[in-house]
Image: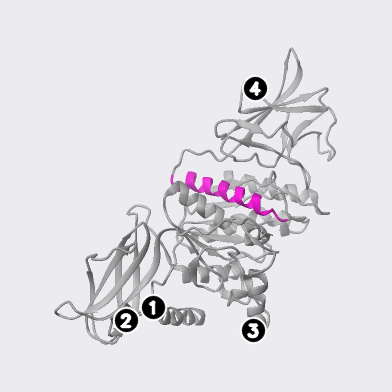
């Protein structure tokens, strides 16, 4: 057992609440704590909890799961225990909550000799929040998502709490990869981020939308760290435990209960450079495979964000290269979904603002509903072809999309497409109008004066394009290109 686990379990044991009127307390040292979200089995819609603790008396260890504040629920015997350490399985806790879990050691007459209660327990789905700063959350702490009693978070200090912004606070973490400052400065660093201007993220919006659509509680495991590269997230460094990002993530998952439903991932900004971009695809595939292998789920959903915009000098070719690689992951691996962010406003030169993060969380939640719950939701507009056509009004390029929810639309005229000749960076000036086809809501018409040699279409090319094409579910068209014009 790791030292950090022993410390956390010690705290959990001290935190157990003695029920009113009990003569002596019953310690629970692992397996369940206040505010915990248990990952349910998707087939049985229930969860099991293996509990360990210590009893000051011998007798029949029994438990009951109480919804809301109701009393009179039946007791279930878990085991006969003696004085000292005990272990027992609390099985088949149904999806839902919050529950109060009552535990008691009863004598032969059914009288409680020792008892305790664990409060605000939920059974639902756990999701890892990982990546760099846009996942950590650098949105303004203004008009943030409000808490929801059905959404809890396993914070970076390895405790379960009601999910409130900011979800990530690096200084809380006991792991050196997240906080390497002086111990005497830790509380000040925690307070500075908690009470500062920045810190809003997308995780709470994602979870609340998922609760709304699925009707199930959600637990979030916060492990993102701003400014990090794919190299720093290398799964091969997991043996370094809390000194590596991937190793620290595994420790957090273990502390949260050991099981999750999926991963929500936002990273790539730090790899948009000539050295790292050529390695990005292989590193991304290796990371997804490692998540699935180490967390024992070969079909684990991996929901990622395609890079948005950046308002600063950057490596433009690599920025677009990373975006294309991220989009291609949907085809390379099963159960990968990509949420575009190119249409969302920034709050500074590289970070999506709080309103946009809410939208992005909603998009990711719809991808989760599609992948996990087989909801009738498309992944969002994906390009299929670009063909030159003519009608009595002139000449145009028809860009066809599939995976569209309802139909395409834009707030005002469509923006974001550019026409290029070969690999030229500058767009061809012949493209003068962009619109959704009024007779085919799955197509965009790009009106042209002339077609250059080796013509191709981009959407969202560059560092800070203005893009506004979405479908009726609010799923955005991704950055893509070059798409050859036929």
Quadrant of the rendered image containing residue 84? bottom left
Q: State the residue lying farthest toward the left.
A: 109
User: Is residue 152 something that shows in the picture?
Assistant: yes
Disc 2: which residue = 26
Q: Quadrant of the C terminus?
A: top right
Q: Element under label 1? A: loop
Disc 1: which residue = 16
- Please check the rendered image and state whether residue 388 is part of the magenta-colored stretch, yes or no: no
Quadrant of the rendered image containing residue 245? bottom right
**4 or 2: mark nearer the eye:** 2
Name the N-terminal-most of marks 4 and 3.
Answer: 3
Disc 4: which residue = 438
Q: Residue at x 22, y 68 (%)?
A: 76
Name the N-terminal-most of marks 4 and 1.
Answer: 1
Residue 304, percent across and down?
A: 60, 52
Q: CA distance from mark 4 to mark 2?
A: 69 Å
> Contact, CB < 8 Å: mark 3 with mark 2?
no
Q: Element under label 3? A: helix
Q: Residue at x 48, y 46 (%)?
A: 369
Residue 401, percent across and down?
A: 62, 32
Name the N-terminal-most of marks 3 and 2.
Answer: 2
Q: CA distance from mark 3 to mark 2?
A: 33 Å
Question: Which residues are drawn in magenta?
Answer: 351-373
Q: CA distance from mark 4 to mark 1?
A: 63 Å
Mark 2 neighbour class, 10 Å CA radius: few under 14, some 14 to 19, many 20 or more: many
Disc 3: which residue = 183
Mark 4 neighbour class, 10 Å CA radius: few under 14, some 14 to 19, many 20 or more: few
Q: Is residue 115 above or below residue 312?
A: below
Residue 80, percent across and down?
A: 21, 78
């Amino acid at each position: 057992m790791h030292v950090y686990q022993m410390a956390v379990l010690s705290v959990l044991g001290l935190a157990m609440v003695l029920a009113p009127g009990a003569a002596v307390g019953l310690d629970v040292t692992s397996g369940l704590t206040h505010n915990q979200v248990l990952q349910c089995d998707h087939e049985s819609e229930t969860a099991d909890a293996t509990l360990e603790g210590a009893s000051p008396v011998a007798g029949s260890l029994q438990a009951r799961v109480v919804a809301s504040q109701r009393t009179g629920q039946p007791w279930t015997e878990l085991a006969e225990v003696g004085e000292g350490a005990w272990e027992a399985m609390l099985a088949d806790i149904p999806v839902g909550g919050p529950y109060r879990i009552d535990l008691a050691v009863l004598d032969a007459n059914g009288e409680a000799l020792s008892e305790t209660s664990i409060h605000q327990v939920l059974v639902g789905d756990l999701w890892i929040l990982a990546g760099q700063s846009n996942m950590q959350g650098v949105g303004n702490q203004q008009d943030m998502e409000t808490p929801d009693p059905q959404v809890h978070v396993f914070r970076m200090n390895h405790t379960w709490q009601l999910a409130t912004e900011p979800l990530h606070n690096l200084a809380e973490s006991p792991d050196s990869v997240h906080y390497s400052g002086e111990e005497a400065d830790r509380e000040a660093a925690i307070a500075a981020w908690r009470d500062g201007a920045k810190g809003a993220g997308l995780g709470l919006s994602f979870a609340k939308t998922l609760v709304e659509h699925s009707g199930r509680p959600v637990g979030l495991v916060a492990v993102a760290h701003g400014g990090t590269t794919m190299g720093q997230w290398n799964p091969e460094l997991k043996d370094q435990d809390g000194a590596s990002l991937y190793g620290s993530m595994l420790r957090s998952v273990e502390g949260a209960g050991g099981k999750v439903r999926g991963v929500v991932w936002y990273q790539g900004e730090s790899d948009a450079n000539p050295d790292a971009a050529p390695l990005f695809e292989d590193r991304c595939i290796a990371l997804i495979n490692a998540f699935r292998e180490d967390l024992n789920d070969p079909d684990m959903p991996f929901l990622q964000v395609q890079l948005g915009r950046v308002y600063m000098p950057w490596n433009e070719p690599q920025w677009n290269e990373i975006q294309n690689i991220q989009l291609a992951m949907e085809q390379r691996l099963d159960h990968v979904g990509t949420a575009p962010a190119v249409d969302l406003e920034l709050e500074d030169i590289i970070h999506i603002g709080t309103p946009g993060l809410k939208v992005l969380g909603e998009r990711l939640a719809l991808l989760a509903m599609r992948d996990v719950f087989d909801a009738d939701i498309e992944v969002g507009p994906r390009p299929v072809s670009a063909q030159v056509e003519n009608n009595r009004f002139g000449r145009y390029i028809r860009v066809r999309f599939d995976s569209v929810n309802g139909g395409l639309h834009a707030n005002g005229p469509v923006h974001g497409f550019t026409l290029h000749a070969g690999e030229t960076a500058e767009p061809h000036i012949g493209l003068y109008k962009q619109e959704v086809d009024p007779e085919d809501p799955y197509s965009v018409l790009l009106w042209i004066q002339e077609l250059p040699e080796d013509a191709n279409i981009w959407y969202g090319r560059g560092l800070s394009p203005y893009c506004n094409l979405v479908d009726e579910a609010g799923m955005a068209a991704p950055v893509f290109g070059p798409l050859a014009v036929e």
